[in-house]
Image (cartoon, rainbow, N blue to C red):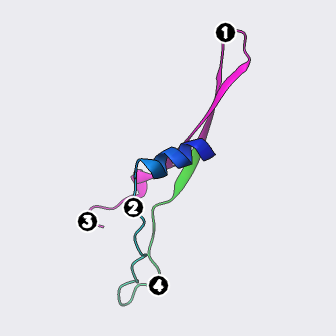
Amino acid sequence: MDLEYDALMLNKTWELVPRPKPQKGQRRLNILTSVWVLVIKRNERGEVNRLKARLAIRGFLQKFGA
């Protein structure tokens, strides 16, 4: 997972931005959540060849215009 994270940072895949303040009358902001997807790649003999990881944003929670 560290290699994947380092590659994302090296390629400047995302940009950290400050969390916005809730609007008047709003208790809190709903920020999109994420999940790490971990995959084990195996060779022809079934031995572990590589471990892969990716960060997936749960975009189905996104609202238009937000």
Q: Nearer the viewer, mark 2 or mark 3?
A: 2
* Quarter in which the C terminus is drawn: bottom left
Helix, strand or loop at disc 3?
loop
Q: Is residue 44 magenta?
A: yes
What's under tag 3, amino acid-wise?
Gly
The percent coordinates of residue 56 (x first, y second) are 49, 47
Q: Does the magenta stretch include residue 8?
A: no
Q: Earlier in the sequence, mark 1 or mark 4?
A: 4
Q: Which of marks 1 and 2 is in front?
A: 2
Which residue is painted at 35% across and 85% down in the image?
23
Residue that protrudes farthest toward the front in the picture: 10
Stretch in magenta: 37-66
What's under tag 4, amino acid-wise?
Arg
Helix, strand or loop at disc 1?
loop
Instruction: From the image, tell me which residue sits under label 2.
Output: 15
Q: Earlier in the sequence, mark 2 or mark 3?
A: 2
* Quarter in which the N terminus is drawn: top right
